[in-house]
Image (spheres, coloured by chain):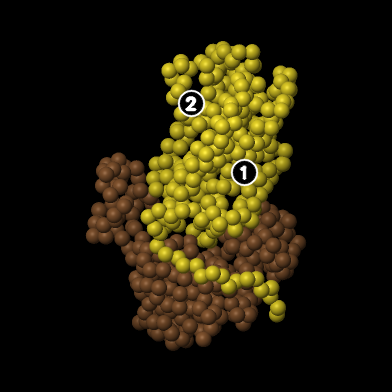
Chain colours: A brown, B yellow
Amino acid sequence: MAQLALKVENVWKKYRIKRPFDGQSESLKEVLNSPINWVINKIYPDPNHRDNHNQDFWALKDISFEVHHGESLGIIGRNGAGKSTLLKILSRITRPSRGQIILYERVNSLLEIGTGFNTELSGRDNIFLNGSFLGMKRLEIKQKFDEIVDFSGVEEFIDTPVKYYSSGMFVRLAFSVAVHLTPETLLLDEVLSVGDAEFQQKSFLKMQELLSSGSTIVFVSHNQNAVKEICKRAIWLDHGQIKIDGKSEDVVNKYGKQIEA
Amino acid sequence: MNSVKTDNRIKPIIVTPPKFIEMPNFKEVWEARDLLFFLVERDLKTRFQQTLIGVFWIALQPIIQVLIFYLILGILVKVPTGDIPYPLFFLSGFVAWQLFSQIVNSSAFSMTSNIGVITKSYFPRLVLPLSSTIGSLIDFFVSFILLIILMGLNSYPITTRFFFIPILLLLTMIFSSGVGLLFGALMVSFRDVKNLLGFILMIWMYLTPIMYPISLVPPKYQILLSINPLTSLVESFRWVFLKTGSLPPMSHFLVSFIMMMVIWLLGAVYFRNMENKIADVM
């Protein structure tokens, strides 16, 4: 068996649902009303304590799985099943509430394309900015620069501010930076659904190429066919728990049946 | 196809739930220095997009401040500044204040203004306020050049004291960055702080001897002003530009350097611990 790429061990993730009028973060009012209680509760959070403002929501409940090097894992499930939360934890954007994950390879995540793009800047500047947000070093970006520009097909406009790009050009450039990362593990969220048919085909081939060159891929998608085609293995998430973990064809078929039912 | 193989096999990274207090990971920040550089470059480029016009807008802020305070405090109220012309007196202190308030403001808001990338990619978040801190130097340099022009017009020479400017700049930047980190972290927890920061900075400016000389303050209140670390920074900048007072002993620099570093570290630690929840609450 190949080496481990990543390991998820009993991961739980809790979110607090706030009442809309209280906004997203704590208000000073909460502290001023009962400062001592607030401090005590910060230091020793009482799991049974439920104030009427907030409600806890467990987005992930005791998730465990392993991914080996070179494997392609699809994650499917309904909206709110915890797919995005899981991907955010794997990409280290947020941390688990309980349990832990272990990353054995360099991981790059692609939760959207064009992260950090600034429309005032040229295509060239954005390649460097976006690449460095995705964890690439300046030298790596320099080495790949020509390849990135070639793949995107926007050579002529590379020194034009991105705000003058058509949305198609924008997407192609952003996607091109992303697929030239060559991380060992690539985390993907629904990115296949961008661009026109020809570009989708191109990006699909690129992904196959990444896989055959030995990259590990974790792919979250609503598109059941894409999961079936790209991934050998799939996990079906349901209400924050793993329902089935198995061969992608079986999992996708069972999931499809349940959706229709 | 032969792809360039970089060293992707790493020491395993274990990601656990946030602990009660965590220390900032400076090694990680150092590794993200390329990103820091590109962020500073982004801010500069977007601000100088219209080249000459860009510099003009940056210069307008100190010019208007000087004009207003010269008119009100210099001409109408006639605040006594000895034989130093009031505009020169004001601007020599204002350069320090402007650097401070700009750094505090931009680092505190650097999280909210970059929320898009925070929720979509992983990088040490400290890079954001640090890039704001470095980017604020631009405004300082524009005001600094205005000050040099004003000094020339009033035949104040450039002296060897100018060698102290880098040290003073560094001290101001460390202190301001620390305060900015504290406010940035507070904002994540308490959104009211967003509205408060403007008022706090305004009051802070009046409590710093920028528009009036410290000698105008009754002696029993002067001690209050000297608690404010900005007071000594502003006074030191004036010492450089206007040849007022005498050189403080070197030990003072060392003490204030240590003080500023402690404040900065406190800010960085607090910021580190807020960083854990920022993607969840914003």
- Which quadrant does the N terminus of chain B fall into? bottom right
Query: Which badge, 2 or 1, is on the more N-terminal residue?
Result: 1
Q: Where residue B111 sits in the image (x, y, percent)?
A: 50, 49
Q: Residue furthest right?
A: A156
Q: Where residue A53 sits in the image (x, y, percent)?
A: 28, 52
Q: Is residue B195 left or right of residue A56?
A: right
In this orientation, which residue lies closer to the viewer: B118 or A194?
Answer: B118
Task: Report the residue at 61% width, 13% height from top.
Answer: B82
- Would you name the residue on which mark 1 appears? B135
Q: Which mark lies nearer to you, 2 or 1? A: 2
> How far is disc 2 from disc 1 in space, using C-alphas?
28 Å
The secondary element bearing badge 1 is classed as helix
Q: Is residue B263 left or right of residue A201?
A: left
Task: Report the residue at 52% width, 54% height from top.
Answer: B125
Asked if the residues shown at circle 2 and circle 1 are in contact, with their CB atoms under 8 angstroms apart, the answer is: no
Q: Is residue B10 left or right of residue B163?
A: left
Residue B94 seen in the figure: no
| Dot 1: chain letter | B
Q: Which mark is residue B226?
A: 2
Label 2 Cα neighbours within 10 Å, binned few <14 / some 14-19 / many ≥20: some
Label 1 Cα neighbours within 10 Å, binned few <14 / some 14-19 / many ≥20: many
Task: Report the residue at 59% width, 48% height from top.
Answer: B131
Identity of the amino acid at label 1?
A: Gly
| Dot 2: chain letter | B
